[in-house]
Amino acid sequence: MAFLELNGITKYFGRQAAVNAVNLSIQQGEFLTLLGPSGCGKTTILRMVAGFEHPSEGSILLEGDDITDRPANKRPMGMVFQSYALFPHMTVEQNIAFGMHIQRVPRKRIEQRCAELLELVGLGEMGKRYPHQLSGGQQQRIALARALAIEPKVLLLDEPLSALDARVRVTLRTEIRRIQQQLKMTAIYVTHDQEEALAISDRIAVMAKGKIEQLDHPEEIYSNPQTVFAATFVGTSNQFSGVVESAEKGLCQANGYTLHVAPLSSSFDGKRVLLVVRPEEITLHASEGESLGNGTGNHISGVIELRTFLGPFTRFHVRIDDKMLLTADIPSQQARGYDAGQRVLLTFLPSACQVLPVDSGVESLTTIPAK
Ligand SMILES: Nc1ncnc2c1ncn2[C@@H]1O[C@H](COP(=O)(O)OP(=O)(O)OP(=O)(O)O)[C@@H](O)[C@H]1O
């Protein structure tokens, strides 16, 4: 049995379904992220789990109990918001203790628990301060401690890092993950930041237009996307819009090139597809004269338009023709010989091409330059 189960939950605002028949099973101790663009329904799902919104259809089960109609204050959930939402006139300790006072926890236990939680979030010395005397990152640590104080069964985090600067965001996301793992806490995390989702989660639900497009482990979402949306929303990708010429031989026509992919099932024959190749799957070669092995790989010639040093790897934008710009990430050690203006050959293996069937409406996806 799943720890937390959403069964076919739908939420209408007026006639629009913000969340549309979503099913989700979350295991005890799991860190699950809802990832998607603004307006796809992530926050609405979280608010239904918290009890701030009532589903128009469907049910929510916690440890087998139907909690769909249970009010928010009777649900064992701790919530952390984007805007820290600390009480400004209360000290850090008073903020953390607030929920425990309401639950009539004995004073001695509250003091002990405050001290434990301040240690847990790395702010042992700051109990007597007021929120305005703390940085944004520190305030969010306190908001986390406050959410954990009532010993919730599920921790709900709604874009908790998006108001913080980039460096603090990275440190704090690692901290959130450490604390969640230490406490074996079940958590649902909402973000539109795909890098954050990949870094922090046990599983990610990629969402679009009120539905879950793909639910899987971060590695799978990245290397084996199941839909065009998942492939293009998560990670940087090169995309070729094309048609399968021979599924058995793994041949596709795309942007005027014949591309080799891994053999496909015969149902792909003649189908319109999107081919997705991650930048790190592409290798650069100095000239077309260079030997390139057995000839079953993909070779495309172009001119380096931009070279960007990014530390461990260097990103190249390579102009193929007036419609196509490909992105290649090369380990910086191997990138030294290449510079803007140089003609190069890009190669990638058939197995590096993800082949995704496209529905109608794909026209707008034709020859999208890499992100
Ligand atoms: N209380 C409400 N009344 C009417 N429409 C709403 C309400 N709350 C959300 N919506 C609509 O429902 C859709 C989903 O909103 P939701 O906040 O869940 O998206 P989201 O993915 O969390 O986006 P964001 O990252 O911008 O918060 C949006 O179109 C939004 O405008």
Image: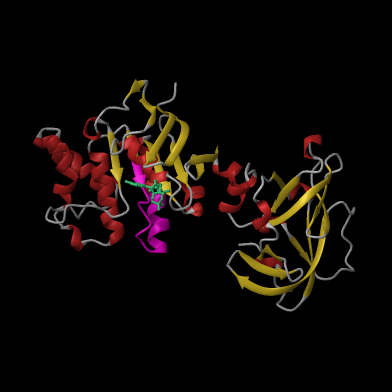
Span shown in magenta = 156-175
Residue found at x 35% / y 61%: 164
Residue at the image point whose x is 70% and y is 60% from the top: 367
Q: Is residue 233 visible?
A: yes
- Kindly identify the residue that appears in the image at 27 percent across and 53 percent down: 84
Quarter of the image containing the N terminus? top left
Q: Nearer the viewer, residue 60 or 26?
A: 60
Q: Indicate whether 69 appears above or below 321.
A: above
Q: Position of residue 305 (x, y in %)?
A: 69, 75
Q: Name the residue at 89% across, 62% down.
A: 291
Query: In the depicted view, which residue is nearer to us: 63 or 21?
Result: 21
Look at the image and tell me whether residue 204 can be seen. no
Q: Is residue 335 left or right of residue 221?
A: right
Residue 231: where, in percent of width, then height?
61, 49
In the rendered structure, does residue 160 fall within the stretch colored magenta? yes
| Percent coordinates x, y for residue 189 in the rendering | 40, 44
